[in-house]
């Protein structure tokens, strides 16, 4: 029998499960090395926590690690139903709230090691969190893809810690979720089959559809984000908002330091801004997480479904 302790939270409606006790030994290497070790030798942890009956398809998991760099408060490895994520914006906001809940950090700036680099986060006095994401950039503009049942769809390819294909002109509304899911999945499959990738062949594993916000007094845009594993982000997506900011910057539609308010399909909002750097922008994303559970889970050797009932299609 194995016992794992984790804290659940949600950031703008999107859940994060942060494992803080009971993680297998992943060594002392970089977060990339430890991610590989988790994937190769201990994927059971991801399966047990994300698959039913303990989890569900849109849940993101995070494992806390002792960082290599003593300037960092923690190392973090993110995963979901399909595998492992380089960075996760809503997830990092959840990690900050979780560490505050555990009494490990207070208000102020904190550094985190991830598999795509060191990112900083500020826990504000009002309990909101700002993350300074990895350098983000638009890789290609106005790329066409042939999508079954639809024809040519044109969008931008941008990096925000994950690879995104960004398409405008959508009606983003909860009443439209079935259609948004079906359309974004078809776009994702078409990108893959037509070998349209990010830089160095990086797989585009997020599709972001944009439309008008519910209320222009509340937000500048509303988005629907399809994640690897076939589910959609309930939050405005931190890495997706970073990718969007890189396109706005490249198009000179948002000045450095100005605020962009990105609304999600469920109506939650992240505030984003950026600073220019040589090879792109450094996005800042601000949102709030709330703890929903403080749990110890039991993985029994005799439970036939201890590692979940089924793999997802993408696993
Ligand atoms: O907030 O960056 C994000 C994210 C990625 C996948 C789900 N959420």
Image (cartoon, rainbow, N blue to C red):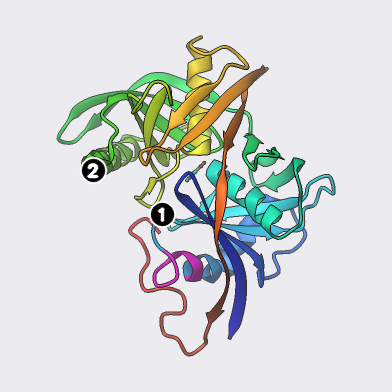
The disc at residue 182 is 2
**Residue visible at 64% across and 36% down?**
131
Residue numbers of the magenta segment: 48-55
- Residue 292 image offset from top left, x and y in percent: 53, 60
> Does 215 appear above or below 129?
above
- Residue 163 image offset from top left, x and y in percent: 48, 35
- Number of numbered markers: 2
Question: Can residue 144 be found in the magenta stretch?
Answer: no
> For the stretch drawn in magenta, what is the main secondary structure?
loop
**Is ligand 1 within 8 Å of the beta carbon of the residue shown at mark 1?**
no
- The residues bearing labels 2 and 1 have C-alpha atoms spaced at a distance of 16 Å
**Residue visible at 50% across and 67% down?**
49
- Residue 152 image offset from top left, x and y in percent: 22, 25
Query: Is residue 187 in sight in this rendering?
Result: yes
Check disc 1 and report the residue beneath it.
58
Front tag of 2 and 1: 1
- Relative depth, front residue between 125 and 7: 125
């Amino acid at each position: 029998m194995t016992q794992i302790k984790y804290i659940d939270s949600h950031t703008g409606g999107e859940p994060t499960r942060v494992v803080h006790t009971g993680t297998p030994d992943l060594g002392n290497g970089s977060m990339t090395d430890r991610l590989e070790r988790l994937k190769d030798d201990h994927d059971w942890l991801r399966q047990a926590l994300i698959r039913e009956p303990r989890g569900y398809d849109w849940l993101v998991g995070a494992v806390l690690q002792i960082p290599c760099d003593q300037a960092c408060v923690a190392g973090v490895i993110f995963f979901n139903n399909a595998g492992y994520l380089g960075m996760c914006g809503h997830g990092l906001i959840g990690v900050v709230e979780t560490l505050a809940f555990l009494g490990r950090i207070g208000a102020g700036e904190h550094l985190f090691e991830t598999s795509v680099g060191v990112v900083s986060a500020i826990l504000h006095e009002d309990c909101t969190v700002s993350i300074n994401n990895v350098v983000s950039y638009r890789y290609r503009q106005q790329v066409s893809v042939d999508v079954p049942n639809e024809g040519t769809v044109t969008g931008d390819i941008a990096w925000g810690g994950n690879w995104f294909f960004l398409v405008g002109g959508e009606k983003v509304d909860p009443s439209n979720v079935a259609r948004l899911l079906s359309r974004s999945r078809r776009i994702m499959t078409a990108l893959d089959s037509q070998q349209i990738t990010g830089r160095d062949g990086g797989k585009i594993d997020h599709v972001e559809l944009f439309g008008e916000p519910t209320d222009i007094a509340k937000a500048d845009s509303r988005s629907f984000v399809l994640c690897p594993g076939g589910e959609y982000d309930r939050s405005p997506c931190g890495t997706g908002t970073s990718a969007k900011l890189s396109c706005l910057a490249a198009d000179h539609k948002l000045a450095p330091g100005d605020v962009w308010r990105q609304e999600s399909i469920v109506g939650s909002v992240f505030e984003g801004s950026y600073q220019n750097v040589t090879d792109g922008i450094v996005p800042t994303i601000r949102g709030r997480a709330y703890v929903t559970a403080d749990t110890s889970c039991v993985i029994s050797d005799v439970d036939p479904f201890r590692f979940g009932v089924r793999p997802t299609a993408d696993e």
